[in-house]
Image (cartoon, helix red, strand yellow):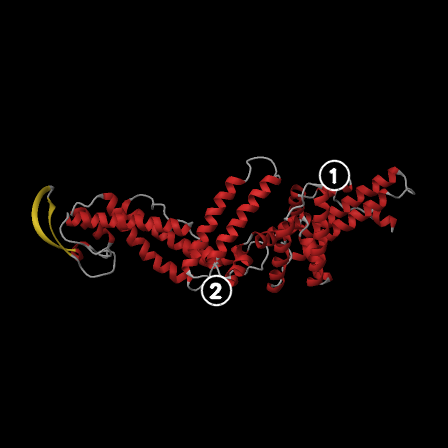
Amino acid sequence: MKSRYLIILSVGANIALLGYLGYLSLGQGSADGEGGLGSGGATVVTNVVTNFVSGTAQNASLSLDWETIRAKDLREYIGNLRTIGCPEATIRDIIAGRIRRRFATQRRELYQRRTNQFQFWKTGGPIASLIDNELVEKERALLAKKRRLWRRLFDEPYPIGPDWVVGLGGLGSYRRVLGFLSSDKRIRVMEIEEAFALREAKAVPRYGPLDRQDRRTLEALRAEKEAALKKVLTPEEKQAYDLRLSETATRLRRELIGFQPTKEEFTQLVRMHRDFQKEHGWLPPTDSDERKAWKEARAKIDKAIGSLLGEDRYGEYRRAQDEAYQVLAKIADRQGLEKKVATEVYEMKQIAENQVASLRTNRLISAERREEALNEIRAETERSIADLLGTNGLKTYKSLGAGWLTNLSPEEPNLDRSGPTIIESFQ
């Protein structure tokens, strides 16, 4: 979509330039489209122009050398254009083009030095790995310099355009994600993506969950999109595309935050999930019989994934899909903590829930004693979480998705430690 936007802007700039050169020639002779913009030789235009001398208009037949009008100093260039009566809007188009080209060269030099590549097997937000923060800051400095220059020349804000926002050295991102394709194929794939994204947006209902008819509509659209992509891509290119941009790969990267598969593992996981999804769909159906068949098929693929990853890695894989763990992983990341902290809190959750389940089924203690023990389990659990996440981290966690703490005990605990805990007295 951005490529199309840039093309439209380029066409508009070319039209403005041609209009200006046509204005110079007034229908006599021709002008080089690159003339006066820093490349190409001088173009001579014979014309009748209006000279402004002491505020009085005088007609004179002159042989205009474009080099006489063009100048390296932008203030002088603007003055020359105004002298020959060039419209202000056209002057701004010409100067904006000159400035953009000048700074584009510096920007290209910045991003030619980047080394970070798109790693499709990384979970979370792999696109973010394409953005080099140091380079973005340097690009921000270039943009600020460009804006200051425009303000000095015209005493107004720099015009909004495709070069107005920084970080798209990042967002050449989409081009870099599809870097295994030729330029022509990248454009065709981007057009397909755009077209079907719009059609899917229209097909999704404005309210309520997806029903069977909605799913069938979306499945038909996605099958049509697959067919369109296969007409453009070779089988090898289609496989590379699927690992980067298919719905299956995108969903896995999002759902497996906290689990980092190897490149080979992720490739196999995408293939397994894609085959399952094609036959059974990603979500379980509402019909009870179909739901039962779906669960049986899911158990088979889970067993195959367990064989692929091994017992320990499979445990990490399953944990990463638990929303409770995902919340913890996000908070730990925001707090600048190690990944293992989220794992430790998650394991605390399991231990505390097991203790509470045991207490609630224990008929040998009184109801009063049980309530005290449940309150202390929650209090001690929250103290331990605060030790790992920090007090602010605990508050954030409780506000985002720690409802299980209330399930331990509805009483809000006092986290001040004083003497042995009730849990310790049971040991």
Q: Determine the residue positioned at 51% across, 49% down.
A: 224
Q: Is residue 198 left or right of residue 391?
A: left
Q: Secondary structure at mark 2?
A: loop
- Between 280 and 283, the residue placed more toward the observer is 280
Task: Give 150 or 63, whichever is nearer the viewer.
Answer: 63
Amino acid type of the residue tagged 2 in the rendering = Thr
Disc 1 marks which residue?
Answer: 412
Residue nearest the observer in this picture, 85 or 43: 43
Mark 2 or mark 1: name the one nearer the start of the chain. Answer: 2
Measuring from the top left, give residue 401's x and y in whole percent.
Answer: 67, 43
Picture coordinates of residue 132 (x, y %)?
Answer: 48, 58
Around disc 1, counting alpha carbons within 10 Å, would you say few (fewer than 14), some (14 to 19), or many (20 or more)? few
Q: Is residue 377 visible to the viewer in this orientation of the structure?
A: yes
- What residue is rendered at 53% in x and 46% in y? 221
Residue 68: x and y in percent read 16, 56
Pointer 2: what residue?
A: 115
Q: Find residue 361 and report its image quarter.
A: top right
Q: Can you name the residue that lies furthest to the right here?
A: 364
Residue at 17% over, 45% down: 85
Percent across and percent down for residue 142 are 38, 55
Residue 413 in sight from this viewpoint: no
